Image (tube, helix red, strand yellow):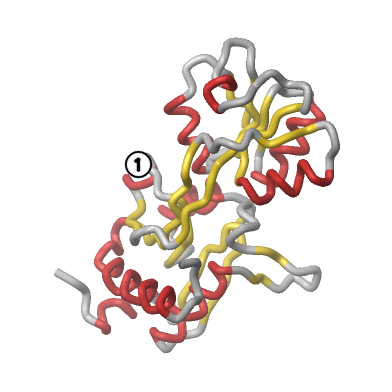
Amino acid sequence: MPATSTDVKTLLAPKGALRAAINLGNPVLAQRAEDGTLTGITVTLATEFAKALGVPLELLPYEGAGKVVSAAPEGVWDVAFLAIDPLRAQDIAYTNPYIIIEGVFVVPEASSFRTPTDVDASGVRIAVGKGAAYELHLKRTCEKAELVAYATPPEVLPGFARDGLEAGAGIRQPAAAFVAANPGFRVIDEPFMEIRQAVAVPIANKAAISWLQGQLDSAKAAGLTPA
């Protein structure tokens, strides 16, 4: 049964404010300015949700999605913005995706790898961000390559280059930016996965999902999310 408006406020703002977890590990979705201000699509959506609820907004920055997920059982955030993953769905409920992002590999320019399938080979080490959606995906799909986890997504590609690994995994946009700034590397154009980004709540509060989906649909109609 869908939650009423009163129920939604109780579910999403039990402490009086909407506490939104913002994942800074994905610069496509959120960024921190030099003065510390948080910006990006997830910040915009969180602002709209708080406004619709009629409550203050509290932004809680995290350096990676894995850290957001780990904090879910602690009850420290009310809403988050995460990639849909079957493993995470044990503890977290999701809306429909509001944006689809591609996961790609970065390799040395001289590498013989041309497709994602080429990368999954014996002796290949792939740098990944600990707890990132693409790490969870590659854990399920890689049969031969070894995954080397770095603490946060921003550390992955610099670490891959510094440590001489055969490939680094990441989001297309920051991967392309890394290659542009670091000669000697290239992006394998074909993505190894599509990362479906959604709004998330702790599973105990899944009754709020229908309300959040309605807000998300309104935000999309207003042009606040990608078409």
Q: Residue furthest left?
A: 1
Instruction: Tell me where residue 215 sits by quadrant.
Output: bottom left
Residue 27 image position (x, y, % from top left): 65, 57
Instruction: Kindly identify the residue that appears in the image at 65 percent across and 22 percent down.
Output: 113
Does 23 sit left or right of 110 as displayed?
left
The percent coordinates of residue 122 (x first, y second) are 58, 10
Residue 6 in picture, x, y percent from top left: 26, 84
| Image quadrant where residue 119 sits | top right
Q: Nearer the viewer, residue 84 or 98?
A: 98
Q: Nearer the viewer, residue 213 or 113?
A: 113
Q: Indicate whether 206 appears above or below 151.
A: below
Residue shown at the point (53%, 46%) measured from the top left = 102
Farthest residue, direction top: 122
Residue 103: image quadrant is top right
**Residue 62 visible within the image:** yes
Q: Secondary structure at mark 1?
A: loop
What residue is drawn where x is 40% and y is 85%?
Answer: 52
* x and y, in percent, of residue 28 in the image: 61, 58
Against 7, residue 27 (above or below) is above
Number of numbered discs: 1
Residue at image position (30%, 64%) is 205
Characterize the local packing of mark 1: few (<14), some (14-19) or many (20 or more) Cα atoms within 10 angstroms. Answer: few
Question: With 150 as the anchor, is 2 left or right in this view?
Answer: left
Which quadrant is home to the N terminus? bottom left
| Looking at the image, residue 105 lies above or below residue 63 | above
Q: Amino acid at mark 1?
A: Pro
Is there any visible trace of residue 17 in the rendered image?
no
User: Where does label 1 land, which residue?
Assistant: 86
Q: Nearer the viewer, residue 197 or 46?
A: 197
